[in-house]
Image (cartoon, helix red, strand yellow):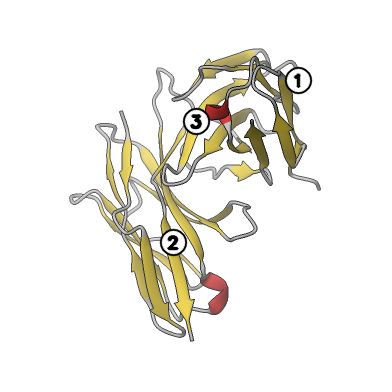
Amino acid sequence: AQKITQTQPGMFVQEKEAVTLDCTYDTSDQSYGLFWYKQPSSGEMIFLIYQGSYDEQNATEGRYSLNFQKARKSANLVISASQLGDSAMYFCAMRVYRLTGGGNKLTFGTGTQLKVEL
Amino acid sequence: NAGVTQTPKFQVLKTGQSMTLQCAQDMNHEYMSWYRQDPGMGLRLIHYSVGAGITDQGEVPNGYNVSRSTTEDFPLRLLSAAPSQTSVYFCASSYSVGTTYEQYFGPGTRLTVT
């Protein structure tokens, strides 16, 4: 079974600073993908960034980057130059791919509530 | 392009009542799924479908039924509502069963069972 662990229930960061949100995962599968989603107070789920298990480079999307350390099974999200609008809940998720089935299921962590302060 | 739509946005049920949460997508995605979100527990998979006519159980399927008669629609049925089913429900869809495609989420349905 797959498991995602986010050990930081809440984080504070000052505006314009960088922040790292931790995510560790557990799977015995070799082929998998790691995702980060943002959930603002309005409730919608917004896809931020994706990292494949075979990708050699860390993923980046604008101010978001994913620090992927495969041997440590970690996939931390780094947000550079934090903005007030970054205040939200952030979820790490994983999907495994198997030829014999298992589909497209996403396994989520419990989330980290980020608050950006002036 | 509407993406993933869910109705209703809010619903209050009494214990024992049944209802159907509607989900539709217009992106021709093969894969659709239902999650519930409870405080401190992230999102948990209820049921999913890899195509019309094919459904399977997720992590927390008890008390819920699904069917997939068309590619576009994936309704979730609560058979006999219980207070433990008070939650926010998200429907999601994506292409294929590969790992590279992100799931697109609907806006959610907030359900309260009294």
* Residue B5 occupies quadrant: top right
Q: Which of the two discs, 1 and 2, sits closer to the camera? A: 2
Amino acid at dot 1: Thr
Q: CA distance from mark 3 to mark 2?
A: 21 Å
Q: Chain of mark 2?
A: A
Residue B99: x and y, percent? 46, 38
* Residue B3 occupies quadrant: top right
Depth check, front residue: B23 or B42: B42
Determine the residue positioned at 40% across, 22% down: A99
Depth check, front residue: A109 or A93: A109
Amino acid at dot 2: Gln
Q: CA distance from mark 1 to mark 2?
A: 37 Å
Q: Is residue B78 visible?
A: yes
Determine the residue positioned at 48% across, 73% down: A63
Same chain for labels 1 and 2? Say yes or no.
no
Residue B13: x and y, percent? 70, 28
Q: Which of the two discs, 3 and 2, sits closer to the camera? A: 2
- Compared to residue A36, the image places residue B29 above or below, namely above
If the image is split into quadrants, where does the C terminus of chain B sit? top right
**Dot 3 crowding, Cα within 10 Å, few <14, some 14–19, many 20+:** many
Q: CA distance from mark 3 to mark 1?
A: 21 Å
Determine the residue positioned at 46% across, 84% down: A15
Residue A77: x and y, percent? 38, 62
Quick check: marks 1 and 2 in contact, CB under 8 Å? no
Residue bearing the label numbered 1: B70
Count of numbered marks: 3
Horizontally, residue A113 falls left or right of residue B1, namely left
Residue bearing the label numbered 2: A113
Q: Is residue B27 visible?
A: no
Q: Secondary structure at mark 3?
A: strand
